[in-house]
Image: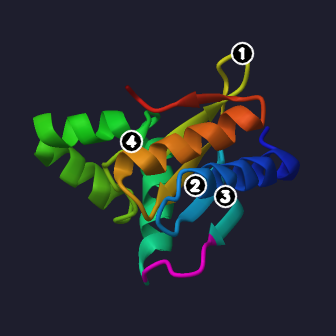
């Protein structure tokens, strides 16, 4: 189970990574394995819908059980499938990097992090940094 303390560590470390790399303002969503929000932050200066995009990255990764980098590949290779999956997920599926599954040391799924605000690759790197700072494993779907 993903604890609130772990979610807060993920959030804080992702923000620290963003600051150290001078990333654009980020929205960060941390969800547990059920898809419930454990932590959320929107830095000053984020655009209006960045939070929904961050949630869509995390939700999409959880919905299909793969990091959003894999969802991006699926969208390129099988666009009709991803379109249908997005519809099945109530529209909350964003198939670009930045949605990273959180796994325990034993590989068990604990949740997902979704980040939006900079490039997708930078969003993903900040998510991975946060997850690793909490002593957990990041699964990008690569």
Quick check: marks 1 and 2 in contact, CB under 8 Å? Answer: no
Element type where label 3 sits in the image: loop
Residue 10 appearing in the image: yes
**In the image as oriented, which residue stretches furthest toward the right?**
5
Q: Residues within 10 Å of mark 2 (few under 14, many from 20)?
A: many
Q: Quadrant of residue 136?
A: top right
Helix or strand or loop: what does disc 1 sit on? Answer: loop
Density class for disc 3 (Cα within 10 Å; few <14, some 14-19, many ≥20) is: few
Taking the magenta stretch, the answer to whether it contains residue 43 is yes
Identify which residue is drawn at 31% across, 49% down: 95
Tell me which residue sits at (46%, 32%) in the image. Answer: 140
Q: Which dot, 4 or 2, sits closer to the camera?
A: 2
Residue carrying label 3: 36
2 vs 3, front mark:
2
Q: Earlier in the sequence, mark 4 or mark 1?
A: 4
Q: Is residue 137 above or below residue 90?
A: above
Disc 3 and disc 4: Cα gap in Å? 18 Å
Against 10, residue 131 (above or below) is above
Relative depth, front residue between 33 and 105:
105
How many numbered dots are placed on residues in this image?
4
Rendered image: mark on residue 18: 2
Residue holding disc 1: 106
Which of the two discs, 1 and 2, labels the residue nearer the N terminus? 2
Q: What residue lies at 58% left-to-right and 30% top-to-bottom?
A: 138
Q: Residues within 10 Å of mark 4 (few under 14, many from 20)?
A: many
Tell which circle, 4 or 2, labels the residue nearer the N-terminal end.
Answer: 2
The CA distance from mark 4 to mark 1 is: 21 Å
Along the horizontal axis of the image, is 78 left or right of 21?
left
Q: Residue at x 50, y 71 (%)?
A: 51
Q: Quadrant of the N terminus?
A: top right
Residue on which disc 4 sits: 68
């Amino acid at each position: 189970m993903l604890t609130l303390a772990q979610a807060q560590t993920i959030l804080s470390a992702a923000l620290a990574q963003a600051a150290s790399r001078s990333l654009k303002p980020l929205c960060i969503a941390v969800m547990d394995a059920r898809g419930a929000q454990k932590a959320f932050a929107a830095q000053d200066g984020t655009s209006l819908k960045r939070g929904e995009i961050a949630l869509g990255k995390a939700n999409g990764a959880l919905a299909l059980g793969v990091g959003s980098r894999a969802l991006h590949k699926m969208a390129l290779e099988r666009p009709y499938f991803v379109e249908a999956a997005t519809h099945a997920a109530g529209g909350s599926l964003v198939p670009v990097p930045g949605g990273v599954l959180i796994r325990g040391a034993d590989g068990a799924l604990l949740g997902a992090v979704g980040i939006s605000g900079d490039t997708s690759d930078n969003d993903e790197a900040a998510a991975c940094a946060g997850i690793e700072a909490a002593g957990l494993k990041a699964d990008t779907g690569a």
